[in-house]
Amino acid sequence: MEGRILAANWKMNPATKEEAIRLAGEIDDLLSELPLVRLLFPPFVYIPLLKIRNLTLGAQDVFYEEKGAFTGEISPPMLLSVGAKWVIVGHSERRNVIGESDEVIRRKAEAALKAGLKVIYCVGEKLEDREAGRHFAVVENQLSYVPVSEDLVVAYEPVWAIGTGRNASPEQIEEMHAFIKERTGLKVLYGGSVKAHNAGELARVPNVDGFLVGGASLKPEEFRKIGEALAG
């Protein structure tokens, strides 16, 4: 896939379909001319409701079976049938709040790729791993489960920098992105409290191929500024 990637992960927001439709429309218009791969990951229930022209829709998670007795789960064919083209797997909240294992995440990625979805595969270390000097070992282990594919990109998310307002330094980001690229040969996005005020600095870090943006993607004007910084 060509170009840098700007991905909006809305997580469990916004609260209503009306707000989701309004927000998606604003972002769609504001980002329309930016020379980027522009992705939007809303909650499952909003995917078929969003009529957008300039963004590509994706899902925040997926299950690894096509159908069956799996209450509450969503399959790759279901996502495709409502217009999703991408999916996120392995987000730190899925790993650390929901308790997903590396093996489950791998199976999800493989099922999504097999069905024809493109994948953002998230990796990253916790604060205690970083402070103990285990960050490379933790990420290397996570990478060992990644199914290498031209339809998959990696997102590096230092868990200690997600939603905290704290950010990894440019040197830490460059070092980890280079480490990931050396082992996978894949594009690497950065996801960790990306905001308008730091997007320019982060966009200039070598080996950063795009951003996976959480909270700031719910603010259309700020998200556009992030996109402009990424587009250069």
Image: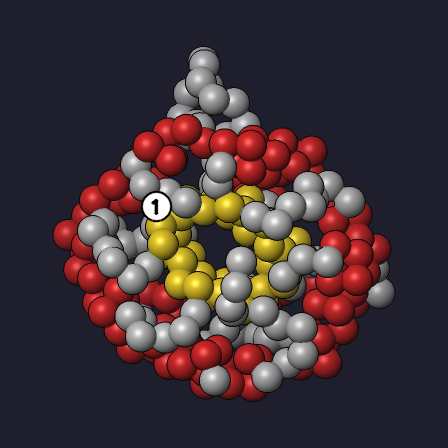
Front residue of 58/130: it is 58
Q: Residue at x 37, y 43 (%)?
A: 84
Q: Position of residue 225 (x, y in %)?
A: 37, 81
Determine whether, in the image, residue 52 is placed left or right of residue 73: left
Q: Residue at x 32, y 53 (%)?
A: 13
Determine whether, in the image, residue 25 is placed left or right of residue 62: left
- For this orientation, the residue located farthest to the front is 2
Q: Position of residue 171 (x, y in %)?
A: 72, 81
- For this orientation, the residue located farthest to the top is 69
User: Could you say whether the residue bearing mark 1 is in a helix, strand or loop?
Assistant: loop
Any part of residue 232 in sight:
yes
Snapshot quadrant of residue 166? bottom right
- For this orientation, the residue located farthest to the left is 18
Q: Residue at x 29, y 62 (%)?
A: 54
Q: Position of residue 95 (x, y in %)?
A: 60, 44
Any part of residue 99 in sight:
no
